[in-house]
Amino acid sequence: MSQGLDNLKHIVVLMMENRSFDHMLGALKKTNSGINGLNGDEWNLDDTGAKVLVQTKATFQGQLSHDPDHHFAGVDLQIFNGNMAPDRVANMQGFIKSYKTRDTNTDQSHAIMYYFTPQQLPILTTLATEYALFNGWFASIPGPTLCNRAFAHYGTSFGNVDMNIFYITDPILSIYDRMNKARHSSKVYYYDMASSSLEVPNLLQNQQELFGVYSDFVKDAAAGKLPEYCFIEPNYSDHPGPGGGQILANDQHPDHNVKAGERFIAQVYNVIRTNPDLWKSTLLMVVYDEHGGIYDHVVPPNCKGVDQLAGHPPYSAKPAQTGTGQAFNFDRLGVRVPAIAISPWIAKGTIVPGTEDPANQRIFEHASIPATVTSHFLGDYDARTDREKKAETFLDLLTDTMRPDDDCVAFRL
Amino acid sequence: MRIIDVPAVEKEAYNPDRPISGLIQMQLVHLSTAEQMLPPNIRRTGINIATLHTEGQAAEYIQKVTALLHRAGKAKSKTTAKTKKTASKSRKATKKPVAKSHKGRKTAKARK
């Protein structure tokens, strides 16, 4: 066991919304060839048949006001370009075609190929290059937010590939229930009461004691009362503050301002970074729930484990649920998303190889979150899916060496 | 130490009149369902979510229902705590003689 792991007392996960790896971090390849980003020659065809290259033209807001499709059928189109043959091969060629279905004109549909420069995103790109960047962290499902977030909480979506309400009937506990039943502490911090949580049907509806707001996270951290595991939800809407003022959505969901999300990531980082006790004993993960319909060049791989609880049938979504006319057996992942592990025990500039390096690849998905938390705090724990049990965990990134304070970046808000 | 200034966001970015996304739409549906399932003694918002079109309107409703859910949760945990307390009191009451006899047995064992 590394010294970093010996010192680990808290795991904090901040899950942002709807941006692909290439859109946010693809430009980093230009200065670091180990990062599996963009060369600049990746393309899709538009509706006139013109080849449209990826371009560093992404803007913070206003460009994706037509929300790109990220439902199951839309993502299927993006990945397979409409090919429904049984032997079809993914080619990531249907992103513009998909965005054109959202009432965009030809020019607007090109925006789905645009990506940010590192100068535009100083927080995310700095964290990516200062700590550990995952070249191969994928959404759990080629589909929308809620089923993907379910994997972060339960290690499965219980057969769901959409945004509909589902109530858990199988004996799989959320990571919070698992922790609390074993007398470990855990919590979900949503931003504020007007933003609330996306985990309404099973968690917020029945287990309000699991929840706090972001200001509680700040207070708990300062008071040395941070739970062993916590999950932070950003603010999902622009709304007035309780005493007046303006509170900006900081989830980065299109078309919310990306800079507001940068500020939020910096705030969460600072809460931990500026507290010496927490800094040496906390692993912060910044990860996005899904790609939001935005271009990424990496073909999503298959899952390692079966999405099945022992003694129960494997999960499968029917054609009516997927909207593609075909069933889905939870055997392949969604589109790649940004994911960064942050701790002073992580070597600067760590890159975790993905599918670009078949010999050394490590494929992560959101089931890796409960898998990692469970393995660290609970050890052997059986009542979870085969898929979660086989998911990659990330605590081996913690080394024996704690980087000196002046080697770790600070953010001035 | 490397210090990076975090860029500020332009004031014009704030737009509570922005139409709600599919994500917030689904959050409204989920919260509305949760609201309908609240215990009858909790007063409902009386808001029809079909009338909510902007982020600002949605946030106001979300805040109200989230508060209601927490209120219901607190009430539930108070009731649970009371029930547990009563149950434990009655258990204690029935256990007392057992405890005495247990103590007695122990003493007897010790004497041996």
Image (cartoon, grey):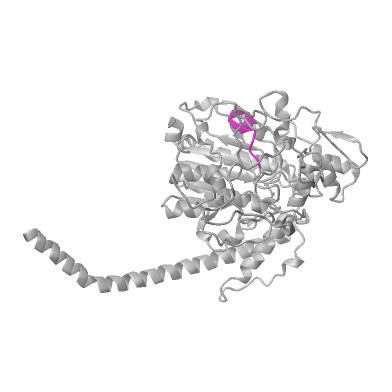
Q: Which image quadrant is residue B94 in?
A: bottom left
Pick the residue in front: A165 or A319. Answer: A319
Q: Horizontal placement of A208 versus A298: left or right?
A: left
- Tell whether A236 sits left or right of B109: right
Residue found at the far bottom of this picture: B40
Q: Which residues are magenta?
A: A126-138
Q: Quadrant of the C terminus of chain A?
A: top right
Q: Position of residue A115 (x, y in %)?
A: 77, 35
The answer to which of A400 and B72 lies nearer the viewer is: A400
Residue A130: in magenta span: yes
Give the percent coordinates (x, y) of residue A65: 81, 48
Q: Quadrant of residue A304?
A: top right
Residue located 64% across and 63% down the image: B31
- The residue at 62%/41% (across/down) is A287
- Quadrant of residue A266 within the rendered picture: top right
Is residue A71 at least partly visible in the picture?
no
Q: Nearer the viewer, residue A255 or A331?
A: A331
Quadrant of the drawing holding the N terminus of chain A: top left
Residue A180: x percent and y percent? 45, 54
